Image (tube, rainbow, N blue to C red):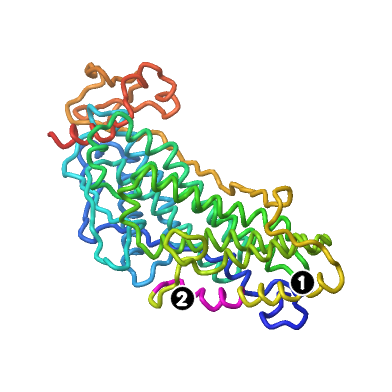
């Protein structure tokens, strides 16, 4: 059992509850939202080219149904993230299937009605500007990316709920899952979409944070850090004396991961970093410094148990300094907690943590002066310093790839020569309506293994395809 913050023998006391609470402090992001005025329908928009294929119609209907569920979940007063994640998990593969179907059959993929997707950002949400600004796009890839990003943030919110409930192992898994989804966006989906897309680069200021490679790569590091925080909290919540040496290295690793998050965000997407809620950036600064302090605290506890009393005292002294409020904006220490800051909720825990370290340090110094007589160095020697451990807790995300759906247009015959450059060799199928014949799309594996096809389809084809679809 973790002891109370009020204890008698400071030299042998266990870590107080405040250490657990500070170690497990995380941020809950808002989710992206679909514009309530968005009334798109895949079934209506793809009616002509899909009406001869029952499986295509069924897929379009499924996409519409799941999207309605997602909008309904977002519109509710309090988002139930488990339900939202379930709907997104079913929706994303179908949207990707429709995208691939258009990509592999541009000659017959035609829209009867424009598809204009409208979303607001969750990452850019600012409590000082609660009005949602929606960004519109006709690209199916935009819909796919925002859906995947929403799935990641919804899963992270489930992790936050688990953290509040004290289920730290589950919270760690959820954050690792969110890290994997953002890694998939940042390393796979978005680089392919952005490749050779000069127009998208020019629209940097207008795009949502969730569509930027740098933002997603930064978010990957943030959620790896949060997953590692939950691993530390799991150990601290167990009865008995923990492995303080390991906890010190893990806490130092969390600080390093959070620093990587900041540097990645700032260097790769400074425009979007400027839109982030300032209170969130203050929280990150607070967490980096408190994790440094906790790392030194755990190191001191470990050294004391190993009878290295002088160095242990030096470590706790450094931890105490690291937990002080800094006197300048760029100085060492914690940022000042303003009266309106969300960090106010951590103020009592911080106060108890500081009191605990002062009491512990006084007790150790007294014991060392009367019993042990160890020399106390001015700082922790290099050979005793913390060596950060970054667990890279991440659950790889794999999108369920479905074979493209068949499209056809009235009057297009099987034997009709498909114009270059995107013709793909595939088997044909008879249509019950002789006037509505078309070609079956290749399977996903066949298309991806066709080298000539791959040379013809560039990475931002989804955007170019929308121009073709809407030119009719």
Specify whether residue 123 is in view. yes
Separation of marks 1 and 2 at Cα, in angstroms: 31 Å
Residue 432, x across and y down, in percent: 27, 31
Question: Could you tell me which residue is drawn at 55 percent across and 50 percent down?
Answer: 256
What residue is pinned by disc 2? 344
What residue is pinned by disc 1? 364
Mark 2 crowd level (few <14, some 14–19, many ≥20, 10 Å Cα)? few
* The residue stretch that appears in magenta: 341-353
Image side of residue 346 versus residue 440, left or right: right
Magenta part mainly helix, strand or loop?
A: helix
Picture quadrant where residue 167 is located: bottom right
Q: Earlier in the sequence, mark 1 or mark 2?
A: 2
Name the foreground residue: 188 vs 44. Answer: 188
Image side of residue 357 versus residue 429, left or right: right
Task: Give the number of the mark in front: 1 or 2.
Answer: 1
Question: Could you tell me which residue is drawn at 25 percent across and 62 percent down?
Answer: 132
Name the foreground residue: 465 vs 363. Answer: 363
Residue 442, x across and y down, in percent: 38, 26
Q: Residue 352: say if magenta.
A: yes
Q: Residue 108: say if magenta.
A: no
Residue 406, x across and y down, in percent: 32, 33
Labelled pair 1, 2 in contact (Cβ < 8 Å): no
Residue 233, x across and y down, in percent: 63, 64
Mark 1 crowd level (few <14, some 14–19, many ≥20, 10 Å Cα)? many
Name the foreground residue: 434 vs 348. Answer: 348
In the rendered image, the quadrant that contains the C terminus is top left
The numbered disc on residue 435 is none
Image side of residue 351 versus residue 125, left or right: right
């Amino acid at each position: 059992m973790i002891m109370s913050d009020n204890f008698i023998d400071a030299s042998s006391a266990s870590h107080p509850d405040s250490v657990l609470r500070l170690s497990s402090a995380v941020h809950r992001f808002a989710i992206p939202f679909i514009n309530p005025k968005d009334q798109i329908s895949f079934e209506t928009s793809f009616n002509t080219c899909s009406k001869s294929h029952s499986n295509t119609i069924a897929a379009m209907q499924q996409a519409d149904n799941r999207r309605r569920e997602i909008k309904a979940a977002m519109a509710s007063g309090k988002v139930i993230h488990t339900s939202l994640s379930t709907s997104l998990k079913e929706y994303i593969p179908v949207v990707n299937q429709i995208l691939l179907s258009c990509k592999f059959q541009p000659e017959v993929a035609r829209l009867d009605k424009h598809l204009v997707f409208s979303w607001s950002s969750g990452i850019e949400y600012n409590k000082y500007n609660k009005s949602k600004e929606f960004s519109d796009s006709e690209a199916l890839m935009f819909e796919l990316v925002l859906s995947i990003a929403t799935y990641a943030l919804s899963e992270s919110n489930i992790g936050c709920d688990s953290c509040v409930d004290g289920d730290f192992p589950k919270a760690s898994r959820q954050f690792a899952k969110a890290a994997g989804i953002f890694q998939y966006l940042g390393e796979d989906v978005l680089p392919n979409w952005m490749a050779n897309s000069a127009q998208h680069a020019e629209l940097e200021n207008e795009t949502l944070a969730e569509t930027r490679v740098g933002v997603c790569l930064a978010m990957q590091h943030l959620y790896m850090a949060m997953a590692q925080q939950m691993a530390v909290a799991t150990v601290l919540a167990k009865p008995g004396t923990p492995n303080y040496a390991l906890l010190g290295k893990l806490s130092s690793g969390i600080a390093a991961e959070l620093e990587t998050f900041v540097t990645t965000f700032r260097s790769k997407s400074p425009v979007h970093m400027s839109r982030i809620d300032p209170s969130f950036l203050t929280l990150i600064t607070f967490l980096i410094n408190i994790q440094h302090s906790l790392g030194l605290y755990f190191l001191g506890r470990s050294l004391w148990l190993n009878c290295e009393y002088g160095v242990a005292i030096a470590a706790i002294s450094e931890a105490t300094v690291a937990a002080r409020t800094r006197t300048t904006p760029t100085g060492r220490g914690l940022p000042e907690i303003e009266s309106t800051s969300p960090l106010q909720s951590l103020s009592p825990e911080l106060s108890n943590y500081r009191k605990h370290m002062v009491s512990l340090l006084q007790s150790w110094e007294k014991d060392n002066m009367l019993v042990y007589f160890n020399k106390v160095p001015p700082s922790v020697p290099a050979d005793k310093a913390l060596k950060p451990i970054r667990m890279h807790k991440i659950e790889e995300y794999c999108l369920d790839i479905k074979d493209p759906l068949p499209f056809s247009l009235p009057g297009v015959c099987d034997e009709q020569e498909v114009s270059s450059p995107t013709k793909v060799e595939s088997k044909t199928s008879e249509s019950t309506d002789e006037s509505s014949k078309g070609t079956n799309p290749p399977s996903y594996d066949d298309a991806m293994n066709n080298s000539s096809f791959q040379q013809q389809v560039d990475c931002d084809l989804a955007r170019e395809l929308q121009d073709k679809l809407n030119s009719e």
